[in-house]
Image (spheres, rainbow, N blue to C red):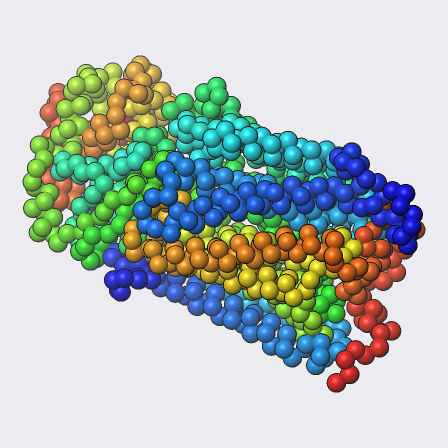
Amino acid sequence: MATAVQPVEPTNYLNADYGIKSWLLTTDHKRIAMLYLISITFFFWIGGLFAMLVRLELLTPAGDLMQADTYNKVFTMHGVTMVFFFLIPSVPAVLGNFLVPLMIGAKDLAFPRINLLSWYIYVAAGCLWLYTIVNGGVDTGWTFYTPLSTAFSNTHVITGALSVFIAGFSSIFTGLNFIVTIHRMRAPGMTWQRLPLFLWANYAAAVIMVLGTPVLAVTLLLVALERAFNIGVFNPQLGGDPLLFQHLFWFYSHPAVYIMILPGMGVISEIVACFSRKRIFGYNLVALASIAIAVLGFLVWAHHMFVAGISLYAALVFSLLSFFVAIPSAIKVFNWTATMYKGSIRFDTPMLYALGFIGLFTIGGLTGLFLACLGVDVHVHDTYFIIAHFHYIMVGGMVMAYMGGLHFWWPKISGKLYPEAWAKLSAMFVFFGFNLTFFPQFVLGYMGMPRRYQSYPPEFQVLNVLSTAGASILAVGYVLPMIYFLWSLRYGQNAGPNPWNAAGLEWKTASPPPTFNFDVTPVVNWEAYNYDELDKPQEVPLAS
Amino acid sequence: MWSNLPLFPPAASKMAHQVDHLYFFLVGTTAFFTILIVCLLGFFAWRYRRKKNPVATQIEGSMALELTWTLIPTVIAMFIFVWGASIYFAETRPPRNAMEVYAVGKQWMWKFQHQQGQREINVLHVPVDRDVRMIMTSQDVIHSFFVPAFRIKADVLPGRYTSTWFHATVPGRYHLFCSQYCGTQHSGMIGEVVVMEPAAYEQWAASGSDGSLASEGEKAFMQYGCSMCHRADYQGRGPNLVGLFGKPVLLDDGRTVIADESYLRESIIYPGAKIASGFKNIMPNFQGQISEEELISLVAYIKGLGTGQSNPPATMAEPTAVYPVGPQPEKSQATSSGK
C-alpha cells in the first residue's frame, strides 16, 4: 500500500484495500460483481466442457465415446450448469450488480450485506453442485421430469436438485436488491423516464426472479422429498400426477428464459445507442416491452406441454398467449434497428456483438413461433429444433449480449482498454462458430432427430459433424476474450473515465470507479441517451 | 430424397403434408423478417457509418411506425395461431371408426398390441390408407411416441392413457422414436413403423396369433373373477359392463364422466376413485396386481361388450358376452359403470 513513489493512483474500488479478506468480506457492489464474474466464468467453462463432450459424442451415429449413462449425465450437467449457474446470474449478477447503483447515481445497492449473502449462497449452491458432479452426477436432464427423477434415476438427484434450490435464493436476493434500489435510491432528477433501458430490463427480470423462483424452489423440494420419503406428489404409482411437476417446473422455467434474455436486451439497448450516437428509438415502448414480456412470460408456461397430454382448450389458450409474448420482442428488434437510422455508427467490438445479437435473436425469436404454433410444435417438440431455437436465444442472444456488455463496460470495470483487433477477431469466431453449430440443428430437428439422443440413425451424421465443427470454432471465440481480458489487466492502456464518450452516469465517474462511486451525489438534469449534447461541443472528427 | 444427405423427412401421412405447408409458411415468414432486419442493419451500418455521417440526427420515435410494427406482426401471428390450431384440432381428435392399436412404453422398448391379437416389440405394422388410433400408456416413466414421417408425437404417461392417430399414405418403413427423455437407453428406445398394403397387412394380421386382444381380455376377466360381480343381468354387486363404453356414467357424488379407456383403466386399478351411483365401494384395488398389457386386454374386452360388429371391419374377432347372460337391451346407462 505504501509504495508512494509512483504518481499517485486515485483510490478506486480495486485498490482501496488489498488481501483476500477485503474481497471475501466486501459489501461493495462492484467487488461482489467481480466475485460473481469469477464464479460464473468458472461454471461457464465447466458447462462448456460438458457441451464439448456432448458434441464429440455426437460426431458419430453410434454411442461410442462414452457409456449411455455417462452421456445422459453429461448433457444434464451441461444444462443445469449453464442455466442455473451461468445464464441466470450472468448479466444481472455481474453487469447488473456493477452497474445498477452506478447508473442511478447511488453509492451501493439498497442491501449491500444481502448482496454479499447472495454471492455466498451462490457459492454454497455451486459447491453442492460440484460435489454432485464429482460424486457421480445426475442424469435426469436439467428439467428433472418426474417420475424419472423421483423414482427411476439411480443418480444423485437430491443433491443436484438441492443445489438448484439453494442457487434460487441467491437469485431472489439479487432481484430483491435491484427492485428496492431502483425504486428508492435514484439520484435527484433520475426519473423513471430517464432510466437507462438496461435498468428497465433488469427491473423486469428482477420481478420475475422474486415472483418465479420460489415456485421452482417448492417444486424441487417436492422432488427431493418424494425421492427421499416416497410421498406421492408426482409419481402416479404413489397417487401423484407427473404433469403437475411439469406445470410447476415450467411456471418458473419459462419466465426464467426471460430472466436470462431481458437483461441481455438491456445491454443491447445501451450499446446500440452509444455506437449509433442516438437516443434509442421509441424509448417508452422499449421500456414498456420489457415489462410486458415479464408479465406475459408468466402466462405461457404450458406451451412446453402441448404433446404432454394437456387438454385441447388449455393448449389453445397457451398457444395464443405465446404468440402475444412474441410481439414485445419484435417491437424491441424493430426499435433497435430504427435507432441506427441516421445514426453515426462505429463498429467497435461491443457493437459487433450487438449486431450479432439482433440478427440471431431475430432468428431465435421467429423460430419460437414454430413452437408456439400448435400444429408444428407437435412435430418439432423435443427434437433438435428446440435445441437450436433456445440456443439461438440463450447463446446467440444472451451470451452475445453478455460478451458485448463485458467488452463495453470492461474499461469501466478494469480501468483498462482491451485489444480491439483481437476482440473483433474473437467476435467473428463467436458469430460464425455459433451459426455453424446451431443452424444445422434446425434441419436435424425437422427431420426428426430427438433431443438427448446419444446414438442416432446414420442419415443424421453430416449435419451433426457440421455442428460439432462449429462448436470447436465457437470455443476458440470464447477462449480468446478470456486471455486478452486478463492480459489487458496488466498491459492494457488506461481507459480514462469515458473511452466511448457514452451517455449514462456510470461514465461520469472514474474508471475504475471509487468505492462509493461518486464523490458527490450527481444531479440529473438531462434525458437518457443525450448523445446530441455529448457530441455537440466536440469538433467534427475525420473531415471528409 | 437424396440417400446420403437427406435434409427433409419423408412425408407419409395425410397430416404430414398439412404440417409441412404450415412449416413452409413459417420458414418463409422467418426468412422474410430475418432478411428484412439483416438488410436494414446492413444498409444503416453502411449508409450511416461514422466516416460518412459524422453527426447523428436525433429522432425521438414515431407512434405510427410503432403501431405498424406492432400490428402487422400481431396479425401475422394470429393467422399462424389459427392455422396451427386447426391442424392441432385434427391431430388431437381421432376420426370415428379408426382402427385401434394399443401401445405400452417401458424402459426401453415399445410393446404394441393389435386387436386381432398380434403383439410386437419395437415394430408396428399398420395398413396404408386407414385411420389408426394409438392408445398408449407407460409402465414406468414418461415416454413419447414420435413418428417423424407422420409428423405426430404424443407423450406416453404412466397411470393414464393418452392417444394420437395417423393415416399413413405411403407404404414403407419409418422411424419410430421415443422423444421424451426416459433414462439410460433413451436413444435405444427406437423402432419402426411398417406401413403395408391392405392385402399384405390382412395377411400379416391373420397370421400367428392365438386369439384376439378382446378374447385375451375375456380370459383375464374370468381369471380375476371380474365376472362374479359385473354380471350382464344386472344382478351383480358391480355395474353391468355391457354397452358401457363411451357412455356417460353418473357417479355417487353427482358428477358424470364418460366411460372412456382412461376411466375403465382407473376403475380397475383404483376402483374407489370414481364410484358409479348406486354401487358400493367394495371392489379390491388392482394396483400392482395386473400388468399394463393385461389391463389393455381387459379394456379392449369391456369396450367390445355389447357393441356387436359395429367396430371397424379389421377388428376380426368380437367377443360375445359369454358370462351369465347375453347383451341386454339398452337401459338408462347411468346405472352401469366400470367400478
- Image height check: is A40 above or below A401? above
> Relative to residue A231, is residue A263 drawn left or right?
right
Residue, x 25% and y 44% (percent of image)?
B191
> Which quadrant is the C terminus of chain B positioned in?
top left
In the rendered view, tell whether residue B139 sits above or below residue A208: above
Query: Which residue lies at the image location 72% right of the left edge and 44% below the top edge?
Result: A34
Query: Can you give x and y, in whole percent of width and height, for residue A227 in the image?
Result: 47, 24
Q: Quadrant of the N terminus of chain B?
A: bottom left
Q: Residue at x 22, y 54 (%)?
A: B168
Judging depth in this view, the residue of A141 and A465 nearest the camera is: A465
Q: Position of residue A199 (x, y in %)?
A: 73, 52
Q: Quadrant of residue A327?
A: bottom right
Q: Position of residue B34 (x, y in %)?
A: 52, 67
Q: In the picture provided, is B204 more to the left or to the right than A485?
A: left
Q: Nearer the viewer, residue B115 or B248?
A: B115
Q: Nearer the viewer, residue A354 or A57?
A: A57
Residue A391 in the image: above or below residue B325: below
